[in-house]
Image (spheres, helix red, strand yellow):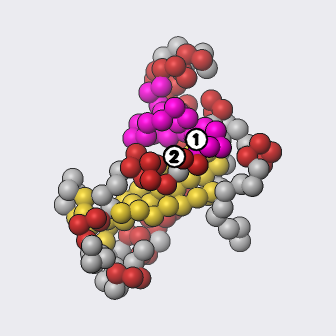
Amino acid sequence: MRPICWPLNWNQNVPIGFAGAQILMDCTSHFRHRVHPGQKEYYRGDKGRHFLTAQVISNMQGIPLNVNIGLGHNNDQGMFNLTTRKFLKNENIVGLTDRAYNHLLLIRPDCLQTMSLLGYQTIENYSKMHASMRSPVEILNGLVKKFYYSVKTCYQSPEFQA
């Protein structure tokens, strides 16, 4: 079994995909009944419940490179700022993301500058291609949701829930 870890050499070991992207990134939330004593940090007001947030980063083939678990009140951009922003900037790594992220090194489906550079005439065609290239990380998020403790009610003590 291969461990989830960052590549040692980004210049040689990482395939480049759509628009020069090297990674795919997305977040997903996991509902929790019992949480840590500092439960307000896990509360999402928009959902009215407590969650853990997981950010999954994979290469262009869908092989997981990094998984970050965060407090439930963080959205995609919040998780990016807390966990991977500095690393991607230092390594100059380009990522493919959804509209929830915003950074110069991240390619979003509504990025008109990238669309024109790649020669797409309409935003619809560009968005479809962008979505199809991001599908491996979406599949990873779906697989994570299949695990029992990700989708079922968990009544364990807080230290065993993360």
Question: Magenta includes 108?
Answer: yes
Mark 1 lies on residue = 89
At 58% from the left and 49% from the top, the residue drawn is: 87
Give the CA distance from mark 2 to mark 1.
Answer: 6 Å
Q: Are marks 2 and 1 in contact (CB under 8 Å)?
A: yes
Which residue range is magenta in the image? 88-111
The answer to which image quadrant residue 101 occupies is top left
Instruction: Compare residues 40 and 61 and report the one nearer the observer.
Output: 40
Residue placed at 47% from the left, 71% from the top?
147
Look at the image and tell me in which quarter the C terminus lies.
bottom left
- Relative to 41, 85 lies left or right: right
Residue type at tag 1: Lys
Q: Which label is found at residue 21?
A: none
Q: Position of residue 81 (x, y in %)?
A: 44, 48
* Residue position for label 2: 85
Tell me if residue 16 comes above or below residue 86 in the rendering: above
**SS at circle 1:** helix
Q: Of residues 18 and 106, which is closer to you in this image?
A: 106
Q: How many marks?
A: 2
